Image (cartoon, rainbow, N blue to C red):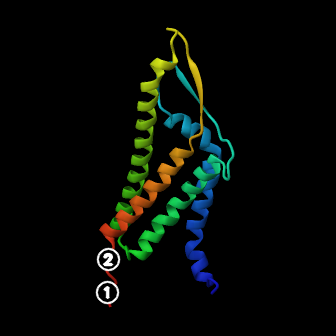
Amino acid sequence: MLLTGMKRIKFLPLILLSIALFVLGQYMYGPVFEFFEANVDRVKFLITDQGGLFRSSLLFSLVLALIPVFIVLVWKTGHIVSVKGKVIVCLVVLAFISLGILIRHIAVNAYFKSITPKLLLLPNSQITYPINPVNFVYYMFIFLCMGCILSWFLFRRENQL
């Protein structure tokens, strides 16, 4: 079934926002992950975007583009109609994404702080470590899904006849 004209217009802002977030993700990929990388003395992280099946920057952009789509799906399937409920769902989802990024950041930081003394034997030496932040993207996506699922269960309204 094709979307009617009114439904297309209704979802146009969602589509435009998703496209804008996708494009923003492509341009902001490097600076965002430089900001999120762990701070470890004498270790400089070099952000890489090595291709596999999908490049990390593409996956990051796709996750950003999916955020509003998933949130609207929670609103629609959970029958969340109040502005307050919609805002709370957005905040919960964004909090979960932030939590995923924070957990990954802490894990990377702890790992490198534990191995740095073994790697750097000379007192003033420094290493450059190439890192592909694809795991950050995975954490973002997993916690996006978790935030949406939790929001749906917490804030859904049963369809009343």
Give how far apart the Cα atoms at labels 1 and 2 are: 8 Å
* Position above or below: 122 against 4: above
* Position above or below: 46 against 150: above
Q: Residue at x 67, y 48 (%)?
A: 52
Tell which residue pokes out farthest to the top in this image: 123
- The amino acid beneath tag 1 is Gln
To which residue does mark 1 refer? Answer: 160
Give the position of the N terminus as an image quadrant: bottom right
Tell which residue pokes out farthest to the bottom in this image: 161
Q: Position of residue 73 (x, y in %)?
A: 47, 71
Quarter location, residue 82? bottom left
Quick one: label 2, few (<14), some, or many (20+) residues within 10 Å? Answer: some
* Position above or below: 123 against 29: above
Q: Position of residue 43 (x, y in %)?
A: 53, 22
Q: Secondary structure at mark 2?
A: loop
To which residue does mark 2 refer? Answer: 157
Check residue 77 in the rendering and tell me which mark sits there, or answer none.
Answer: none
Q: Secondary structure at mark 1?
A: loop
Quick one: label 1, few (<14), some, or many (20+) residues within 10 Å? Answer: few
- The amino acid beneath tag 2 is Arg
Q: Is residue 1 left or right of residue 90?
A: right
**Observer-nearest of 134 and 37:** 134
**Observer-nearest of 16 and 42:** 42
Q: Are marks 1 and 2 in contact (CB under 8 Å)?
A: yes
Give the position of the C terminus as an image quadrant: bottom left
Q: Residue at x 61, y 38 (%)?
A: 30
* Position above or below: 160 against 83: below
